[in-house]
Structure formats: C-alpha cells, structure tokens
Image (tube, rainbow, N blue to C red):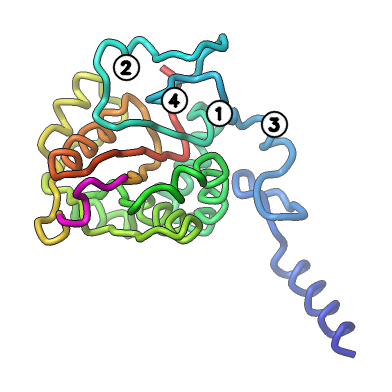
Amino acid sequence: MLNALSYFVSKFRDICFPITCCNCGKIVDSEGLCLDCWKKIKWLSDPKCKICGTPFEIDINALCPMCIKKKPYFDKAISTFEYDDFSKSLVLKFKHGDATYICQQLAVWLYRVSGEVIKNSDIIIPVPIHFFKRLKRKYNQSELLAQRLGKFGGIPYEPRVLRKKKHTQQQEGLSRNARLKNINGSFDVAPKYAHLLHGKTIILVDDVLTTGATANECSKILKRAGAGKVVVLTMARVSL
C-alpha cells in the first residue's frame, strides 16, 4: 500500500513539477542539462596554465604569458566551463535573473573539479558586492555558491571576512586596464575577522573569471591581512 502510494505521489510530482534543463528549460530525466546543452557547454580540462587556468591548445606543463609576466596574488584558479556566447545565458540567468534554484547544480559541477582543493583548505569566502548592488539584485550569487561549496567540502563559510567598501562601475565591458583601475582599493578585510586568515589556505569564490582583476585585488587584500594561500573558484572563465 505504501509503495503504491509513493509511486503515485512520485508520478504526480513528475507531471505537475517536471525536472527541467537548468539552461533551456526542456524537460529532462534528472537535474542538470539536457543532452543538447551538455554538448554545447565547453567544459574546462587540462592542459591549462598552472596558476590562472587559461586553457592551452597543446599539453605543456607551464604558465601562460600573463602569469609569467606578472604572477597574480592568488595561487591557483579553477573554473568549471568556458564563458562564451552559449554559457553566458546560464550565467546571467543565475546572476541577474533570480534563478537561484540552479545554484545547487552549478555548485555540484564546480565541486567536481575542485573538491580535493576545498577539503584541504581552511575557510571559504565569497567575493562581496556593495550594499547598493545587493539592494538592487537582492542576493550575491558568489555567496550562494560559496555556502554550498563549503557544505560539500566540510569547511567553514565566512561571508563577513571580505568587504566591498567602495561602489564601483560594472566590470563587464571594461578593458583590462580599466578593470584594474576600477577595482583598485574597493575591498578590505573586516578587522573583527582578520584573525581567521593568519597562515590559512583560503578559497575565494566568484561567478566568472575574466581578466582576473577582481580575484587578484581580493587575493592581495587577503594576503596582506595574513592569508597564507588563496585559491580562486569560479563557475566560468573567459578564455583570453
């Protein structure tokens, strides 16, 4: 009797609340992407730069020209997929479209490529957004990702360590130099939580890595406050 009831409840749920592709909305059998969207996403894998994760066309164990020219403050960056014309819709849906329900799946994908790094780290911190931006957007997508990743890896989630103290222009659409200038001096570490950083390995979570200006500025502030190592995790990255 209970098995039959459970079966009918399950069927009723599937009919009334079907599982859909988190990108295009097509009905699927399990959570994630439909087959068509899965094939179009450019999942990132080796070979790539040992520090920033820039994909290479040939298998060389080396750094990209940008990291050779000037090593970033962060020690390593890991991303799930390439940010291109196709994946942009998925990222913007989560970032600006109130589609917070897809955060769980995005976090699962990111954890698959970074789980060992997370478990061997001390705390996880999201890249913060300014108070005015939070009022407009209602949530910080990096916080949602970081919170789930912290639970997956069993490490403390500390959203109040890093602060966005200056309201800056939107980074999207700016050149590399303009991004660096725009973001410079806009973050700081809350004195109350600075003791959590001393000598620790920090996971810094953001949504997209483009030029790395934001990740680098945050990593600089964290290391100056005493962090020993900073690993940046993003769901997507732009291949420059």
Residue 39 is marked as 3
For the record, the magenta segment spans: 195-201
Q: Is residue 179 left or right of residue 156?
A: left
- Callout 1: few (<14), some (14-19), or many (20+) C-alpha neighbours within 10 Å? some
Quadrant where the image shows the N terminus: bottom right
Tally the marks.
Answer: 4
- Report if residue 32 lies within the magenta region: no
Which residue is located at x 11 percent, y 44 percent? 166
Q: Can you say whether 7 is above or below 221 in the image?
A: below
- Callout 4: few (<14), some (14-19), or many (20+) C-alpha neighbours within 10 Å? many
How far apart marks 4 and 2 lie (CA) works out to: 10 Å
Residue 155 position, x and y percent, is: 40, 58
Q: Is residue 198 left or right of residue 103?
A: left
Name of the residue lying farthest toward the front? 199
Q: Is residue 221 left or right of residue 121?
A: left
How far apart marks 1 and 3 lie (CA) works out to: 13 Å
Q: Which residue is mark 4?
A: 53
Q: Earlier in the sequence, mark 4 or mark 2?
A: 4
Query: Which residue type carries mark 2?
Result: Cys
Q: Which residue is mark 2?
A: 67
Q: Earlier in the sequence, mark 1 or mark 2?
A: 1
Q: Which residue is mark 1?
A: 44
Q: Can you say whether 215 is above or below 70 in the image?
A: below
Query: Which quadrant holds residue 172?
Result: top left
**Mark 1 or 2: the one toward you:** 2
